[in-house]
Image (cartoon, grey):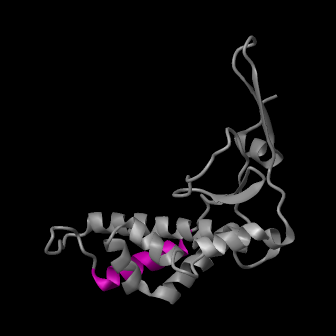
Amino acid sequence: MRLPLPLLLLFGCRAILGSSGDRVSLSASAPTLDDEEKYSAHMPAHLRCDACRAVAFQMGQRLAKAEAKSHTPDASGLQELSESTYTDVLDQTCSQNWQSYGVHEVNQMKRLTGPGLSKGPEPRISVMISGGPWPNRLSKTCFHYLGEFGEDQIYEAYRQGQANLEALLCGGTHGPCSQEILAQREEL
């Protein structure tokens, strides 16, 4: 019996790859979520760095797409967006559905997964839990950064490069990806 891929992902999966002589058995199961991961309205602390990186990636992608459509180059020949345009783009970024993100487990550690989050070891096979609270949490995280830094500062950091945007949102001494914060989470 063949199950469609969504059912395999929902129930976990076990696959046997290769011809009859060289079979390789792979198996995966959905991560077990604790109460905070299931029910909290906020992004769990151990996933905030991944969430920040996802937000920075989406902001960068959408701003780049808007600049490519723009017809007003600045002095260096690059496309510069008007304040109203980049404000709208950033607001639309936070308002998107975020359905391409979810949680999977790598080396007994839960991580967000999705576009822009491929750093680190990847398992050969894994099961991602998407939907549920994750899209709303990512949207709230995105709007939090808009409120904390403002559209002007975010766009200026983006204009200096994607790494600068990620450093603004996620770095610093108290950012979710700072070494001090990550070390504290590992102790827990």
Give left or right: position of 27 versus 183: right
Position of the C terminus by quadrant: bottom right
The residue at 68%/43% (across/down) is: 123
Q: Is residue 21 left or right of residue 174?
A: right
Residue 180 seen from this side: yes
In the figure, is residue 62 to the left or right of 137?
A: left
Residue 12 vertical placement versus 62 (above, below): above
Position of residue 136 measured from the top left corner of the image (x, y, whole percent): 66, 74
Instruction: Answer with the quarter of the image where residue 95 lies.
Output: bottom right
Q: Nearer the viewer, residue 83 or 5?
A: 83
Measuring 41% from the left and 84% from the top, which residue is drawn there? 151
Determine the residue positioned at 64% across, 68% down: 135
The answer to whether residue 133 shows anywhere in this view is no
Q: Quadrant of residue 13?
A: top right
Q: Residue at 51% of width from left, 75% of height from top?
A: 171
Image quadrant in which you'd find residue 5: top right
Q: What x and y, as percent, mark residue 75?
A: 13, 74
Along the line of sight, the residue nearer the viewer: 175 or 125: 175
Is 17 rendered above or below residue 96?
A: above
Q: Residue furthest top?
A: 21
Is residue 95 a member of the stretch shown in magenta?
A: yes
Q: In the rendered image, which quarter contains the N terminus?
A: top right
Q: Is residue 91 magenta?
A: yes
Main SS of the magenta part reads: helix
The residue range painted magenta reads 82-96
Percent across and percent down for residue 111 are: 68, 59
Q: How many marks?
A: 0
Question: Which one is in front, 64 or 104?
Answer: 104
Q: Position of residue 49 (x, y in %)?
A: 61, 69
